Structure formats: C-alpha cells, structure tokens
C-alpha cells in the first residue's frame, strides 16, 4: 500500500504514532542514562515511576487516537459511515502489552537481557547499553501493538466482518514492502523489531486501497531503493527486472547471506532457494553452474555450488550488461 493511496486519516494517525513513539523513546533514554548503575535492578526500580507514567500516558493516547481514527479511515475507504455497536474504552490497553502480559514484566525483560550479557562476559557498559536499547524497543513495540489492537476493536465494533490491509509508513524495509496491501482476517500480521507498519481496516477492498509494492519502490531514488533492498547491487538488480520477492527473501533467515573466498575473488552468496524445491537451484544446474545436490545437514540437500548474490554477479560481469542479465537469470534472480 502506497502512502498517498491510504486514507488521509490513517496517514495522519501513523505520523502521530511515530512522533509519540519517538518522544517516549527519548524520555526513556534520558531516564535510564540518569539512573543507570552497576546494580541493574536498583537502576530499573529508580526509573519505574517516571517510566510507567510516561508509558501509560502514551498507551492511553495511542489507544484513544487509534479508536477515533479507525472509523473515519473506514468511512473514507467504504464511502459511508459505520456506527459502533459497543463502546471502545482506551483505558483497557493501559498496562498491557500485545501478548496480554503486564507491561511491568515486559519492560523488566530489558534488565534480564542486561544481566545475561554480563553472564556471557560482556563489559558492564555494554550491558547498560543493551538495557537502554531493549527498553526503547520494548516501549515502541508496546505502543505499536496498542495501536493495532485498539484499531481492530474499533473496526469490529462497527462491522464484525472488517478485515485489515497492511499499510506502510515509509521509510520501510523490503520485508514490509513485499507485504504491503495484503488483506487478512482476524490474525495480526507478523512484525520485526521496531516495525511501525499499520493496519487499515475496511469492510471491503476498494481498488485504491491496495497497490503493487513496485508502485512504491518505483517512486524511490537510487539511494532510497538501495536502503530498502539492502544494497546498491540489489537496487540495480531490481531496476534490471529481478524478482522483488527473491531479492528480499534472500535475507529472510539469519545467516542465509554470507561471504567467502572463491574463484580468486571474495564473493557474496545466499542459501535461499538452493534446495531441491528451489527454482534457483534448478536454474543453476541447467546453466551448468552446479552439478548436483549434496547433503546440507540432516535430511536437507542443496546444490553443490553457491548461489551468487547480485553484488558478485555485477562484479563478474563488469561493463557487460548482457552478461549480467544472463547471470542474474541463471542464478534465479530474473524470472
């Protein structure tokens, strides 16, 4: 879903949520840095009153904003007003995280992460920074979950058949872009840490509510596109017609993209789509780049040669654009 195709109410709501989340993160940072010490538990206890006063206030403001904005966004999409069958009280989200646990326990997890870091032998200052980052991230996630949950209840209070459409609040990463505009039922979409994508609810899917992710990407300049897709080479491959899902999914598993020394050069490769079921592996065998499948741990098998990333492909091809396109095709990047 492209930003300018969203209901303007939803766009403004997303901006307010981002600003509120940023303010809360800054507040938490200042609190922690002013009280952080060698006793992590005591430091946490010292900031608790101010921390949870700020978090509770932000949650209630977020829930109220989402509950008020959602019906208006639905009206903009559906073309007619919808009236609530039951009231939505923003206070019910205060003090509760997205999984239904007390926010006190959720935020304490940051201290646990710091203690675990010390047990692993990390320096105390590093552990304190880990706690700081965790406190910020957890608070941001709590606000995002509050917004989505309040929006869902406000939507269902008006039409139980309402479904959400995943929407971007740019700048967004490639993982979010390829899911933009996808509708679903009651199940919330998965997110990565600090994801601030929103759900826009509707009782039907109007034509202007969904957009091909390419419609968003094609509006970006080269720098923005490289940032979204992970590298300048990936951006160039996309411009050359590479499959968007293939480029993004190359990174979907931790460690799936690696570097190695081969063929007298340093290469970047991915293990994605290199099993017997992967289309890239069969492209590589058909082109003669790989010979067969070999054991890759357990019962899984992969092709016996690395699947080169676009970065290495463009290095090999040099100024020969036709060769680059051929290599992109044979390594499964082009359809």
Image (spheres, rainbow, N blue to C red):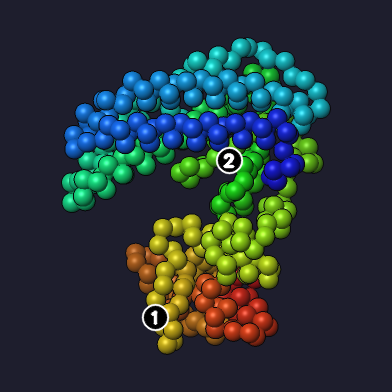
Q: Secondary structure at mark 2?
A: loop
**Residue drawn at x 59%, y 84% as measured from the top left:** 318
Q: Earlier in the sequence, mark 2 or mark 1?
A: 2
Horizontal and vertical percent position of residue 233:
57, 70
Who is closer to the viewer here, 25 or 77? 25
Give coordinates of residue 238: x percent, y percent.
65, 66
Q: Residue furthest bottom?
A: 264
Toward which corner of the image does residue 283 lie, by quadrant?
bottom right
Numbered circle sitting on residue 197: 2
Residue at the spot x=37%, y=69% of the render? 296
When the figure is inspected, residue 21 is found, relative to residue 92, above or below; the finding is below
Q: Which mark is residue 261?
A: 1
- Neighbor class of circle 1 (other Cα within 10 Å; few <14, some 14-19, many 20+) is few
| Residue at 71 percent of width and 55 percent of height | 219
Give the quadrant of residue 97.
top left
Q: Residue furthest top?
A: 86
Q: Position of residue 191 (x, y in %)?
A: 50, 43
Mark 2 to mark 1: distance in Å?
Answer: 38 Å
The quadrant of the image that shows the C terminus is bottom right
């Amino acid at each position: 879903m492209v930003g300018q195709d969203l209901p303007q109410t939803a766009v403004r709501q997303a901006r307010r949520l981002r600003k509120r989340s940023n303010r809360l993160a800054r507040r938490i940072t200042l609190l922690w840095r002013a009280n952080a010490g060698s006793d992590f538990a005591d430091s946490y206890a010292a900031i608790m009153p101010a921390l949870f006063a700020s978090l509770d206030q932000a949650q209630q403001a977020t829930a109220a904003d989402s509950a008020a904005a959602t019906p208006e966004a639905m009206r903009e999409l559906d073309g007619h007003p919808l009236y609530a069958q039951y009231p939505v009280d923003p206070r019910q989200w205060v003090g509760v995280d997205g999984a239904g646990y007390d926010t006190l326990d959720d935020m304490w997890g940051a201290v646990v992460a710091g203690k675990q870091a010390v047990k692993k032998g990390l320096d105390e200052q590093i552990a304190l920074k880990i706690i700081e980052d965790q406190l910020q991230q957890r608070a941001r996630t709590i606000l995002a979950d509050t917004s989505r949950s309040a929006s869902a209840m406000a939507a269902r209070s008006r039409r139980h058949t309402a479904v959400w459409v995943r929407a971007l609040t740019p700048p967004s990463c490639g993982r979010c872009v390829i899911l933009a505009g996808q509708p679903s039922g009651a199940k919330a979409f998965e997110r990565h840490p600090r994801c601030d994508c929103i759900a826009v609810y509707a009782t039907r899917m109007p034509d202007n509510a969904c957009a091909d992710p390419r419609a968003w990407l094609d509006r970006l300049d080269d720098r923005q596109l490289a940032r979204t897709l992970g590298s300048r080479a990936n951006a160039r491959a996309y411009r050359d017609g590479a499959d968007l899902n293939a480029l993004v999914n190359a990174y979907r598993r931790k460690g799936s993209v690696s570097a190695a020394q081969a063929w007298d050069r340093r290469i970047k490769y991915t293990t994605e789509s290199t099993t017997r079921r992967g289309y890239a592996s069969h492209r590589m065998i058909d082109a003669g780049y790989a010979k067969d499948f070999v054991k890759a741990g357990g019962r899984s098998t992969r092709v016996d040669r690395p699947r080169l990333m676009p970065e290495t492909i463009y290095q090999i091809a040099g100024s020969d654009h036709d060769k680059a396109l051929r290599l992109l095709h044979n390594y499964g990047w082009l359809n």
